[in-house]
Image (cartoon, coloured by chain):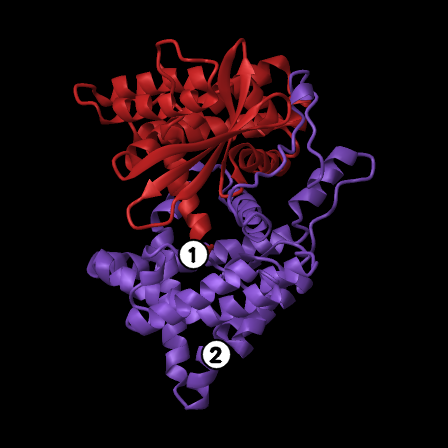
Chain colours: A purple, B red
Amino acid sequence: MFGSNPATTTLVAMALSIGVLAGCADAPPESDPEARAEWKRLNDPLEPSNRAIFDFNMAADRRVMKPVAQAYEHYVPQYGRDRIHDFLDNLRAPLTFANDVLQGDVDGAVQTFIRFTFNTGFGALGLFDLAGEGGVPYHSNDLGATFAVWGAGEGPYLVLPILGPSNPRDAIGMAGEFFVDPFDYRVGQVGQTWAVYARAGSDGIDRRQAALAPLDDVERNSIDFYASVRSLYRQHREAEIHHRDGVAVPEPGYNLTSAKDSEISRETN
Amino acid sequence: MLSRRLMILATLAGSLFLAAARPAHAEDSGNPKQFVSNLADDAITLMTSSGLNDAQRNDQFRKLFVGSVDLPVVGKLVLARYWRIATPQQQQEFLKLFEDMLVLTWSNRFKDAAGNVTFHVVDVRPDVDQGVLVDSQILREKQQPIPLIWRLRQTDGNWHIIDLIVEGTSMVFTYREEYASVITQNGGKVEGLLNAMRRKVAQLSQSRPGAAAP
């Protein structure tokens, strides 16, 4: 989710240990197979601790991240925010490229390579996404997705402190990227660690600003905000990894014929 | 916090149902692409037309919405296994509250999105159960288009929406997981969900006067 940064590693480790220490939710009894299937599908055995961390995140968000993002939106004009956004996207390109390659996604790798060289060279070090305007669109990729393509399961749903919804596979991917990000590595090497923090901070503000209206909307319209976010996140992540063309559509996952007889069932993913 | 694209969801979700309103006049029911683009056109006209007050606009939106979404089927799909343990009375009340929730949610979202996005239908392809999937895109200035898939079924010779899928995120599935969670937290009782829905509908109606059902 957030770009790699030193804090990420600590937070991931923290979250993993909290998950282990906190009690798990009880699975429904064997006698209720439907409830068990649902429990399995939701994939959230750590729900009690996840909810606690989610509440903590929301409280921290209200006090710090959201006001900062609102101020950013208020004081920095759209044009300036676009430049910062394009610049941050471009900084991530080497990692995206590496993951495209690791996944054998030749088209993706070629696109990312063209974008990076073009935008870095002609787009003022990435401030301007000229390649995007020229028809080579941005796509995201990350180490968690690479693990997934290699066959790793996501593991249980996990809410990370500050960083938000994730799972062990993606959390480990995020932590792993910290060690190999060329930009972070290089500035660390020349003793300019502040740049790592500046980048992580800008990345966070950029993302939170983009999320201002949509997240408010989901919160306003849901009865159980936590459950809505969990569902949206997991479905979206699944589609991001397995249906990149945006054309593939998940199976209905419900039996319409029987829906008419009120016999609704959802096959497991 | 959440991924940027996920965040975009709600925004576009707004624009989804902008298209989910159906005109009072008869449609070319045979052509799903036409059905979807007519909905979009009618909804845009409704939301941007002057001379209507909020209450009238909401009222008309509800009519279009109810006419184009197969609410009983969507409601059953959302409540899923709990539909069977619900009493007939609870089922009816659920459908009514669900309609209120959807209409309030989507009319608000649509109002916010109207004017900021354009919409266009890309393709149509077959789906299971003799249904179709209509691929469409929400276009925003200087940003990548957001893919939106409409899952349609024919009922009584007319196309109806049974689900909307934005970037892999199904509306039906999201509501189902949310409501299942609410029911679980209320000791597995459907009544607990209905209470929560009543409160939510009241809250949403208050923030937009005139939006509630008469």
Q: Indicate the amino acid at tag 2.
A: Pro
Is A134 left or right of B50, judged from the image as shown?
Answer: right
| Residue holding disc 1 | A59
Is the residue A120 above or below the residue A192 in the image? above
Residue A233: x percent and y percent? 53, 49
Image location (x, y in percent) of residue A263: 70, 21
**Residue at horizontal 37%, vertical 49%?**
B144
- At a point 24% along the width and 23% down the height, the residue shown is B54
Q: Which quarter of the figure is the C terminus of chain A placed in?
A: top right
Q: Mark 1 falls within which chain?
A: A
Q: Are marks 2 and 1 on the same chain?
A: yes
Residue matched to label 2: A182
Report the residue that reaches farthest toward the bottom.
Answer: A190
Q: Secondary structure at mark 2?
A: helix
- Residue A52 position within the rendered picture, expressed as x and y whole percent measured from the top left: 55, 55
Q: Which mark is residue B113?
A: none
Q: Position of residue A96 (x, y in %)?
A: 50, 66
Q: Nearer the viewer, residue A149 or A269?
A: A149
Disc 1 marks a residue whose amino acid type is Ala
